[in-house]
Amino acid sequence: MSALPTPLAAPFTASFSVQLQALATAIRTAQPPPAGLLVDEGARGIEVYRHAYRARLLAALRDNYTVLARALGDEAFDALGLAYLAAHPSRTPSIRWFGAALADFMAGSGQDLVPHAALVDMARMDWALRQAFDAADAPPLQGAALAALAPEDWAGLVLRLQPGAQRVALAHAIEPAWRALRAWEPESGAPQPELDAPAPHMHELLVWRPGLETRWRSLESLEAALLAAVADGQPFAALCERAAAQLGDAEAAAPAVVAALQRWLVEELLAAPDQRAS
């Protein structure tokens, strides 16, 4: 069969594109499909596509929020996921990023969907760890590079966090429950861990990825402040000033910052300078 003549091909292609866009809208919503595009299956056929579309996005959401899904259970998580999908349809070509606003959506939802506020923190922790896992790679800063600095260069030293490093504000002490649920394998048949409701506790969680393994730990207020300064691009001297203000002791400031720096080097939390920027 020969191709359509050029004068006919453009309007045909445009018309078909419009129909496909209308079909995609019908699959994502309750709108009827374009007339004549699903002749054989009719209304029942479009429901098959709608079900498959929702199921695929729910599976992606469950993969992005593994611990939250285990905490809620299948039925409650599906209800939450469908409500989120209705409010935040997928807008990106990759479903990897579907669910980016789930924690904020949960924070504004009622108890029917989110029976405990600590579940919002679990969602934030899940998403931060997935972001860290997918973050760009950067060689870690080595202690030898700092040892080579002249004394007069330390005040202006600007440290750089690894691309996947994040500080996550949490309102509950969810870490023990999160760890227990992450270790639980429902497929093994083992019963779900019995957990107490996490207590209210305002703090920050540090999430990062050295090599191929994501890690996390809670932050004390001083280290959280120092990491905030690093993230803002403030020099070493400013970090010492912030430590002095928080500790109320200028003499203790520099040793505290150096101790934090030594820990960050061991944990590979800092990235080596970007040679392209120099």
Image: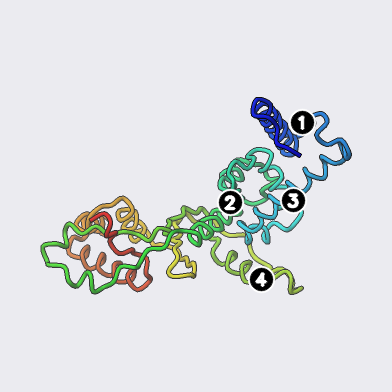
Q: Give the vertical position of 263 relative to 235 (above or below).
A: below
Mark 2 packing: few (<14 Cα in 10 Å), some, or many (20+)? Answer: many
Residue 86: x and y in percent read 69, 39
Residue at image mark 1? 31
Question: The N terminus is located in which quarter?
Answer: top right
Residue at image mark 4? 184
Q: Which mark is nearer the camera, 1 or 4?
A: 1
Q: Which comes before the other along the chain, label 4 or label 3?
A: 3
Q: Which mark is residue 120?
A: 2
Q: Are marks 1 and 2 in contact (CB under 8 Å)?
A: no
Which residue: 67% across, 26% down? 11
Q: CA distance from mark 1 to mark 3?
A: 19 Å
Closer to us: 87 or 11: 11
Mark 4 packing: few (<14 Cα in 10 Å), some, or many (20+)? Answer: some
Q: Secondary structure at mark 1?
A: loop
Q: Which mark is residue 55?
A: 3
Q: Secondary structure at mark 4?
A: loop
Mark 3 packing: few (<14 Cα in 10 Å), some, or many (20+)? Answer: some
Which residue: 77% across, 33% down? 30
Amino acid type, residue under disc 1 in the picture: Gln
* Residue 35 left/right relative to 120: right
Question: The C terminus is located in which quarter?
Answer: bottom left
Q: Which mark is nearer the camera, 4 or 2?
A: 4
Q: Which comes before the other along the chain, label 3 or label 2?
A: 3
